[in-house]
Image (tube, helix red, strand yellow):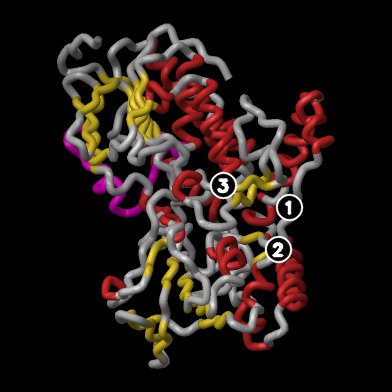
Amino acid sequence: MAYSLPHKPSVLIIGAGFGGIGMAIALKKAGVHHLTLLEKAGGIGGTWRDNTYPGAACDVQSHLYSYSFEPRHDWRRKFGTQPEILEYIEHCVHKYQLASHIRFNQPVTSATFDDRTNQWRVVTETGKEFCADVLITATGQLNRPAWPALQGLERFRGDCFHSARWDHDVSFRNKRVAVIGTGASAIQFVPEIVSEAGHLDLYQRSAAWVLPKPDRTFTRFEQALFQRLPLWDRGYRGLLYWKNESRALAFTRFSWILELFARQAIREARRWVTDPDKLRRLIPDYRIGCKRILISNDWYRAVNQPHVNLISDEITNVDETGIVSATGERRPVDIIVLGTGFRASEFLSPIHITGRHGQSLNEAWSQGAKAFKGISVSGFPNLFMLYGPNTNLAHSSILFMLESQYRYIMSALQALARYPQAAMDVREDRQTRYCQVIQQGLKGSVWEAGCSSWYLDKQGNNTVNWPGFTFSYRFATRSVDTADYQFLRPLAEPPDRD
């Protein structure tokens, strides 16, 4: 992944997770050294730094959930765990000497495009201001925990925390525990804490489709093969890619294929759950794939434990020492763990971003987030998004999509080099046409089967998922077509940089 940039712009990247780190590596390889990453926390890793709950792991295979240009041969498991993935990101930062470019504990509050200089001015909570020719956002979609709006939650006297902010000082031993939510995080941490808890109330808004996880440790012989035979490693990664890629058809065009997986999930539930009432409530009443399909080998066994109470009643309020459900029943509790997911469809919130002529991104997105190829937004020149609207996947590795976006952004910087001091702004008609095609592509997909999910925004629009193959996205982002953009001259000469 090498690019030639005759003109080296100054670049600001917001976020030091997988997206931001990979983008910084691409820029450094192209000789861009006027580069700064602004990280809100005190360490790198994004979601893999934040989610340290017991059992945290990835649901994409390790060899595919890593940069293609930086393979790791000694993955311990087929599906990487949180510590191992964070270790991999730290390795990349060290190898490509990015530490000096990262500014920690700098949560960005605002970013403003200056028409006079064609530069972005970014302000952080500390009051520091940064300026650059190009602004790249790499905040991810799973970085802001969603706290449920439960009446009285703030009055609870026991320990209460979100799974993405796990309190490792809290002991569950012989405690009455309430877990609110049964999504991707809960199916990983509940099996880890269930044997320690004295009693566990599991509040489920809707059941999840859960499939077995084909996970295991790699043998030393396999690790040696990956390291000593690069073609073997690349071949294994390729096999994983095409195996996962084939599933896109089931989500977007032939949803009947997913019914085969639904039968498998039901068989697994019946195999492990002996309580008829629990079994009935663990089988979803919506089409498989409409919400995120989860994978686990111990979820059903954990819920089947006699001291686990599966509750489908709506929560009405929380008091100092208990939770009250819609039936009026009050259940005492010592610890509340919120497995309620993330505010995925809000993208760059709460950063206040202002583009040309004082236009706010919140205003531009008042009817839903839109971006050309999930990267550029009309009215916001030289702003490029990683993991933006309609680039999420349900079938493969998001890192493949990110690497496609790196390539597109580097192509954009090459285009800018031909227009010194200019800023490129995607044409509104091109953005509108592109987004119409995307929404049309989502028609008939399983995500429009009528269920409520985090794929949908407040208006009911699917602004999250990509409606096709990842290789089709890579083809669409292989290079910038300058006809899609207008190139703007600054209203005044920009100041000299250091």
Q: Residue at x 52, y 47 (%)?
A: 392
Q: Which residues are magenta?
A: 355-376
Q: Nearer the viewer, mark 1 or mark 3?
A: 3
Determine contact: label 1, label 2, CB under 8 Å: yes
Q: Is residue 226 left or right of residue 344?
A: right
Task: Point out the residue furthest to the bottom here.
Answer: 328
The numbered mark, 1 or 3, whose residue comes first in the sequence reads 3
Circle 1 sits in a helix, a strand or a loop, which is it? loop
Q: Which residue is mark 3?
A: 82
Can you tell which mark lies on residue 215?
1
Q: Nearer the viewer, residue 188 or 36?
A: 188
In front: 96, or 420?
96
Quarter of the image for residue 129 reads: top left
Residue 228 rendering spot, x and y as whole percentages = 80, 24
Question: What residue is shown with label 2?
Answer: 297
Q: Is residue 412 left or right of residue 243?
A: left
- In three-dimensional space, the C-alpha distance between marks 2 and 3, rounded to whole angstroms, equals 17 Å
Q: Residue at x 76, y 68 (%)?
A: 264
Report whether 170 appears left or right of 194. left
